[in-house]
Image (cartoon, rainbow, N blue to C red):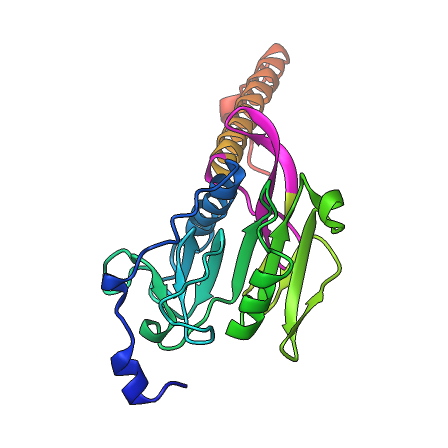
């Protein structure tokens, strides 16, 4: 923990850059973290104790200078406000978040190697990020890694975990890949999963299922009505009034 003197000397996020101004070099670096964020906004819509940042600077005191941030493609923190003081964050300074560091960071490997397996891994380990997810669908052979990897911090070092989707009990979420259609395009996406390794559905998927169930219920009701009408017609053919059947 920082002393009160050091806390006073630390800069405010109002005066710190919101990012490092390094442009992304492929659309997935922006799209997939935002995709996870919007999905989580549906899953945890009633929770106000989490924050998911996309391409946002994390300022911390475990590096050489608290004014030099690390900027993951995405990160998830628990136990913090979704809207800090009711406002949107410009950046994430650990000393302004009651020393809460992200529980998970996500890096999308660039066309040009960006230190995801070396420098950034060391920074996140030093910072104390529990889970580090690296998504590398295009260049995993180049980097001699797997396309999707989850590392967990054990004794201050990251250990590669086994299994996909991978369940993170401390967070209460699993994460993994899923190939499907989104926006009319068949593609591989990252998704959140529950403890039973079932993929969380998109809001539009839920709406489509609800519509399908409604149509099925309507069809069943119509079939029941038709069967009742056919039975009544049959009883009339036998000279029996279906509206005045004797009580059993």
38 relative to 90, above or below: above
Which residue lies at the image location 40% right of the left edge and 65% below the top edge? 68
Indicate left or right for 153 with 244 as reference: right
Which residue lies at the image location 23% right of the left edge and 60% below the top edge? 86
108 relative to 215, above or below: below
Magenta segment boundaries in residue numbering: 178-204
Furthest residue to the top? Answer: 237
The N terminus lies in which quarter of the figure?
bottom left
Judge whether residue 190 is colored magenta: yes
Is any atom of residue 196 visible in this view? no
Q: Work out whether residue 117 or residue 37 is closer to the camera in this orientation and state it.
A: 117
Q: Work out whether residue 39 or residue 76 is closer to the camera in this orientation and state it.
A: 76
Report which quarter residue 120 is drawn in: bottom right
Indicate left or right for 54 with 223 as reference: left
Report which quarter residue 17 is drawn in: bottom left
Number of dots carrying numbers: 0
Q: Position of residue 128 (x, y in %)?
A: 53, 74
Q: Position of residue 188 (x, y in %)?
A: 63, 36
Q: Work out whether residue 149 or residue 62 is closer to the camera in this orientation and state it.
A: 62
Which residue lies at the image location 35% right of the left edge and 77% below the top edge? 98
Which residue lies at the image location 62% right of the left edge and 10% below the top edge? 237
Q: Work out whether residue 49 or residue 231 is closer to the camera in this orientation and state it.
A: 49
Q: Position of residue 166 (x, y in %)?
A: 67, 57
47 relative to 193, above or below: below
Q: Position of residue 72 (x, y in %)?
A: 49, 55
Indicate left or right for 202 with 3 as reference: right
Judge whether residue 9 is colored magenta: no
Is any atom of residue 24 visible in this view? yes
The C terminus lies in which quarter of the figure?
top right
Furthest residue to the front? Answer: 64
């Amino acid at each position: 923990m920082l002393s009160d003197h050091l806390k006073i000397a630390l800069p405010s996020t109002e005066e710190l850059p919101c990012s490092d101004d390094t442009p992304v070099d492929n659309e997935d670096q922006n799209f997939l973290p935002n995709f996870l964020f919007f999905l989580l906004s549906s899953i945890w819509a009633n929770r106000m104790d989490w924050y998911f940042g996309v391409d946002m600077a994390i300022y911390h005191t475990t590096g050489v200078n608290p004014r030099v941030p690390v900027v993951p493609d995405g990160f998830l923190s628990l136990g913090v406000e979704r809207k800090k003081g009711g406002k949107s964050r410009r950046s994430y300074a650990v000393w302004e978040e009651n020393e809460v560091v992200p529980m998970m960071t996500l890096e999308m490997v660039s066309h040009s190697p960006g230190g995801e397996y070396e420098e950034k891994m060391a920074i996140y380990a030093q910072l104390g990020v529990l889970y580090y997810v690296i998504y590398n669908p295009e260049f995993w052979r180049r980097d001699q890694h797997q396309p999707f990897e989850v590392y967990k911090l054990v004794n201050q070092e990251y250990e590669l975990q086994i299994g996909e989707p991978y369940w993170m009990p401390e967070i209460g979420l699993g994460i993994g890949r899923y190939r499907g259609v989104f926006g009319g395009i068949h593609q591989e996406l990252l998704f959140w999963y529950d403890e039973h390794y079932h993929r969380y559905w998109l809001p539009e998927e839920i709406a489509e299922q609800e519509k399908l169930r409604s149509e099925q219920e309507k069809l069943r009701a119509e079939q029941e009505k038709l069967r009742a009408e056919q039975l009544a017609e049959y009883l009339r053919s036998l000279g029996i009034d279906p509206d005045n059947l004797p009580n059993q």
